[in-house]
Each structure stands twice: as C-alpha cells, then as structure tokens.
C-alpha cells in the first residue's frame, strides 16, 4: 500500500467516523423524543392546555404555567432586546479599542459562562428584595434578561461585523451622520442576524428552571398572570414538579408538557432559521 | 370642556352608585372571601397542600392560594422574613430558623397535618431478607460503614456472600434528613457511597433492576410500584412491622414514620381568608392526604390540632 492509498483510506475512515458522530446525536434525540411522544402524546388535548393544576393527574392542565411562560418570554424580550442591541452597537461601532473596551468584552464573555442559578440568586436579592418587586413575573423576566444579555450582545456584534464596510462608506459619502448610517443602513442590514440571536437566546430562557425557582416562581398558581407584578409559574417548573411525583399519571402529564415546551422551542428555532435565510439572501 | 365635565360627573355618579351598592352585596354574601395566601416550603408536603388549595378554590373562588416548592429549609427562610403566610415542612423547625423568626418578630403555630412512612425496600428476587432491626439499618447506613459494610453476609451471616448495593435520597431531601436522624441518631450523618437521587422514581428503577439492592424512600412511591419492589418490615423493639396505613397511623411502625407540618404566621391570621383556609385544611387533611399517597392522623389528633389553632386565632385577634 503506497502513501496515496494510505491517505485515501484515512480519508474514508474519517468520513465514516464523522457520519457515526453525527448519527449518535441524532439517534439519541430520536430515542428521547420518541419516548416522550409515546408517553405524552395521548395526554394532549384542549382541556390539558386550558385546565388548572390539580391533584388528580387526569384533571390537571398547564394553563397557568403556559401563560406564565408566555408572560415571562414577552417581558424578557422587551427588556433584553433594546439593552443588549444598544450595547452591541456601542461596542462594535462607537467604542474605541482601548483597555476599557477590552475589559468590557472579557466581562461580557465571562457573564455568558456564569451558571444560571447564580443569576437567580442575584435576581432574588436585587429585584425581589431590594427593588421590592416580589416573586413577580417582572422580577423573573428581569433575571432571565440578565441571563441572556451576553448571548444577544455577542450575536449583535457578530451580525454588525458581517455588514460590509462599503455600505457604511457609501452612506458617509452621501453625507449621512454616524447615527443616520447606523440606524438606516447598518441595523437594517444586520437585523436578520440580530433577530436570530434574540430568538435563540429566548428559546434558552424559556427552558430555564433553576433561576426562576430561586426568584420565587411557584409550583401551584390557580390564576394566569394579569399584570407584570403578579405571581407566576412556568412550564419547566411544572414539568419538574410532575416528574418527581409517584403516580404514573403525573409522569405522563410531564411528558405531555415537555412536548408542548419542545413545540414552542421548535417554532422559535424555525423562525430564527427563516430570518437567517432571508438575511443571507439579502446580503448576497 | 362642557363635554368633559359631563363625562366626569357621569363617571362620578356611576362610581358612587356602585360603591353604594357594594356593602349590601357583601352582607348578603358574607361567606365569599377575597385575598391572597402565599405558601411555600417542602415538596413532600406540597401534594397535600395542593389538594387542599384545589378543593378550597371550589368554595372560595376569589381567594388566590399560591404554593411554592423551595424545600423545607428554603420555605422557612421566606417564612422568617414574613414573605409567606404558611410554610410547608417535612420536619420540625430548627433552632436556627426559630432564631431567624424571632429576629423579625414573627410568631407562628405548628400544626401536624399527616404522616409519611419511610419504606425500606429490596428487589423482588431477594429471597433472604424478611425484616431489619434498627441496629442492622444503622450498621448499614452509618458513616463508619463507608467502604466497610459491602456484603450482605456482613449484616447477618446466613445472608449471601454478595455485594450490597444501596439506594437512597440525596442530601438535600427532607427524607434523607429524617432517615439519618431516626436510624443514625443525627440528621444528615450517613455513609456517602450509595446511589443518591433527589428523584425517588430513579431509586425505584434502581432497586427494581438490581437483585442485590437495598434502598429507602417515601411510602407513596412504593404504593405506585408494588409489583416491582418488595417491602421489608422493620423491628420496632417488640415485633416486625411493615408500613401500612394502619401501622403508620397508630404509631407501631417505628422509627421510620414521621409527621408532616404546616406553620402559620400569626400576623397572617388577621386575614379571615387565611383562618378559613387553615380550618378547611384541618377539616379535609385526612381524606386528601390519603388521596395523594400519605397517611391520615388519627381523628383525635386532628381534633387537637383544630383546638390548638382556635386558641391561637383567639390569642392573636
């Protein structure tokens, strides 16, 4: 066997190794989702979505945690979007490359690696106790906003970096100010990438349990939140609660709630993919 | 401007009419309460409190009862800051927590609401074990056993010369606290080399799939998995007793049955909805606790709790 054949063989082996690695993740996902579908699919009906929690598994529904999740998601988006996009624009377009901005950058990347329960403890002290928001939807949303801020900031910067410099220069050449350039040219051109980042960050936020338990999200709430200062529960907490109950009925309920949560995440990821494709076409 | 004035006076008229009508309506329907009751604490007690809240809602739909599951310790932390009206607990309040309550001028009452039995379990293929004494359980689980008591025949010589595989709840669980206190004499002192999980369903799977296993957890989890596990009796000093509704309730299943509690803040009972909720709790705890897998107290004990609560309400009026 000469060296060319050897290299070809290595090439083939690496290809199969790559296929095996890709399939391993996929097979695990299929087994996991399959198991959950078998357990939970028969449990999902309209009543399951609109009923309140109950001690009887077959009478329980997910209305209040579902509404809690929706409230938290919307508020988190409203809070985190303007702050993190503004921060990303500042760091990419305005900040001078000096020690201060290097320090800021390192800290933002560090924040992205902090365990989520630490954000929960911070939220409990700052939002719940010092700001007296109580265990409210708003306190939960503020905590989750902190959690996903670094993710959106990084995504925003990447999206802005990808905007060709020629667009900025053309804008300046026509006499536009810096702000006009950013607002009318850079942001629209990078909006697809920014939105993708925001949606992916939000789909992480919707699955978070630990920080919300610390902040004081509840397990049993017989009413959907009516305002940002109401108490709330969210889907992951309801799932966590059901899965540790002894009765099989509750475990099936947990599987059904997982399907709903997965469905929401898939839709959000789908929207993110749609925006990314649209954005890529536009730039080309 | 004229239009605005007209509108304003209209609104005034309507609001005054409504507020006039209100007292009469209230009197006619004095049973209907409104308000908010916040409860937090043990996830073991949670199913009972949830069941009570669910039934209470049928009578009093305008009282919003919310329940969290921060754990017994986490619940007391909030309770001692006055953030919750009622705290669920799977063990009595600790000295440190009593001090925290005193610091914030919070006085409270402790009420027993049900019993929970801790079941000791083996695999159904295990043919040699029929009972344990407390001493034998201690010999297996005490900290000194770590790395030493590894085989069944070290406990009783006639048992097989096979490795023993231990399963139990994790250290954060109230069940672990209770078991270690009842068996090893000190809450939290245990050997560490066993398979631990906070999710009792994981322990069920572990014991069901392992012939040489031994484990413990709440009786409710055994009741749901009777065909997969074998319940082992515990010697209470006089005879071997298996945990059942009867033996836990009458106290003969010793030392592995424990009471479950609720604690009520004295400031909260100035609100009639809280008093009404607690009364409703004690009235229905027997039926509802059994429905969710726990064991009711004897009837005279519920009567005692009711009296105790009544006196507490009088005292704090």
Image (cartoon, coloured by chain):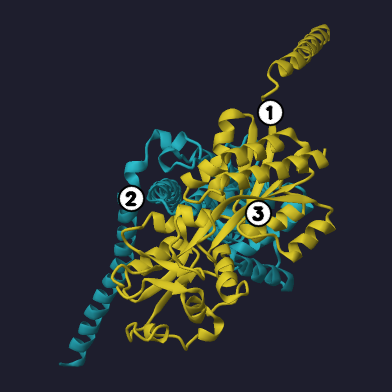
Farthest residue to the left: give it: A1
Res. B53 image quadrant: top right
Question: Can you give x and y, in whole percent of width and height, for residue A80 in the image?
Answer: 63, 51
Choose mark 3 or mark 2, whichever is in front. 2
Q: Quadrant of the C terminus of chain B?
A: top right
Q: CA distance from mark 3 to mark 1?
A: 29 Å
Foreground mark, 3 or 1, reads 1
User: For mark 2, what is the residue?
Assistant: A39
Name the secondary structure under disc 2: helix
Contact (CB < 8 A) between labels 1 and 2?
A: no
Closer to the camera in the image, A100 or B118: B118
Determine if residue A178 is in view: yes
Could you tell whether A258 is left or right of B57 in the image?
A: left
The residue lying at 56 percent from left, 48 percent from top is B298
Q: Which residue is mark 3?
A: A215
Q: Which chain is yellow?
A: B
Could you say which is closer to the camera, residue A146 or residue B202? B202
Name the residue beneath numbered marker 1.
Answer: B33
Q: Identify the chain drawn in cyan.
A: A
């Amino acid at each position: 066997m000469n060296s060319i054949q050897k290299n070809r063989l290595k090439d083939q082996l690496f290809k199969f190794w790559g296929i095996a690695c890709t399939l391993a993740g996929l097979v695990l996902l299929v087994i996991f989702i399959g198991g959950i579908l078998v357990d939970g699919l028969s449990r999902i009906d309209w009543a399951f979505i609109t009923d309140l929690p109950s001690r009887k598994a077959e009478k329980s529904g997910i209305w209040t945690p579902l509404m809690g999740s929706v409230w938290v998601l919307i508020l988190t988006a409203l809070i985190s979007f303007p702050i993190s996009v503004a921060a990303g624009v500042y760091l990419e377009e305005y900040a001078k490359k000096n020690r201060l901005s290097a320090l800021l950058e390192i800290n933002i990347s560090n924040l992205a690696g902090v365990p989520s329960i630490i954000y929960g403890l911070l939220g409990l002290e700052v939002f719940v106790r010092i700001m007296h928001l109580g265990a409210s939807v708003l306190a939960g949303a503020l905590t989750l906003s902190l959690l996903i801020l670094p993710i959106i900031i990084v995504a925003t910067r990447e999206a802005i970096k990808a905007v060709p410099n020629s667009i900025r220069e053309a804008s300046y050449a026509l006499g536009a100010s810096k702000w006009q350039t950013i607002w009318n040219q850079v942001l629209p051109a990078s909006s697809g990438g920014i939105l993708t980042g925001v949606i992916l960050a939000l789909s992480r936020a919707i699955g978070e349990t630990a920080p919300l338990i610390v902040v004081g999200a509840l397990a049993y709430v017989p009413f959907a939140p009516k305002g940002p200062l109401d108490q709330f529960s969210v889907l992951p907490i309801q799932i966590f609660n059901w899965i540790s109950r002894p009765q099989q009925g509750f475990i099936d309920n947990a599987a059904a709630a997982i399907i709903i949560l997965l469905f929401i995440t898939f839709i959000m990821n789908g929207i993110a993919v749609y925006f990314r494709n649209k954005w890529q076409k536009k730039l080309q | 401007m004229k239009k605005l004035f007209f509108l304003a006076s209209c609104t005034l008229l309507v609001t005054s009419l409504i507020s006039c009508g209100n007292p009469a309506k209230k009197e006619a329907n004095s049973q209907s309460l409104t308000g908010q009751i916040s409860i937090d604490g043990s996830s073991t007690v949670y199913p009972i409190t949830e069941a009570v809240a669910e039934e209470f809602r049928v009578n009093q739909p305008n009282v919003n009862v919310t329940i969290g599951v921060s754990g017994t310790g986490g619940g007391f932390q909030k309770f001692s800051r006055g953030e919750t009206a009622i705290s669920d607990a799977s063990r009595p309040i600790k000295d440190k927590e009593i001090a925290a309550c005193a610091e914030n001028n919070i006085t409270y009452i402790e009420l027993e609401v049900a019993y929970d039995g801790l079941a000791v379990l083996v695999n159904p293929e295990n043919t040699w074990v029929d009972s344990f004494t407390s001493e034998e359980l201690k010999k297996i689980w005490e900290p000194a056993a770590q790395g030493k008591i590894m085989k069944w025949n070290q406990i009783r010589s006639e048992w097989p010369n096979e490795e023993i595989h231990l399963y139990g709840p994790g250290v954060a669980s109230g069940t672990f606290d209770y078991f270690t206190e009842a068996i090893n004499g000190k809450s939290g002192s245990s050997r560490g080399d066993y398979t631990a999980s906070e999710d009792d369903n994981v322990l069920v799977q572990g014991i069901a799939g392992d012939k040489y296993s031994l484990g413990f957890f709440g009786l409710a989890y055994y009741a749901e998995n009777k065909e997969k596990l074998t319940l082992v009796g515990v010697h209470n000093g006089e005879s071997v007793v298996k945990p059942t509704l009867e033996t836990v309730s009458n106290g003969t299943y010793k030392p592995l049955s424990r009471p479950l509690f609720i604690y009520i803040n004295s400031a909260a009972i100035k609100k009639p909805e809280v008093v009404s909720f607690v009364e409703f709790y004690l009235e229905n705890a027997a039926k509802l606790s059994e429905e969710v897998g726990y064991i009711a107290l004897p009837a005279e004990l519920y009567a005692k709790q009711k009296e105790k609560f009544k006196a507490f309400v009088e005292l704090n009026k």
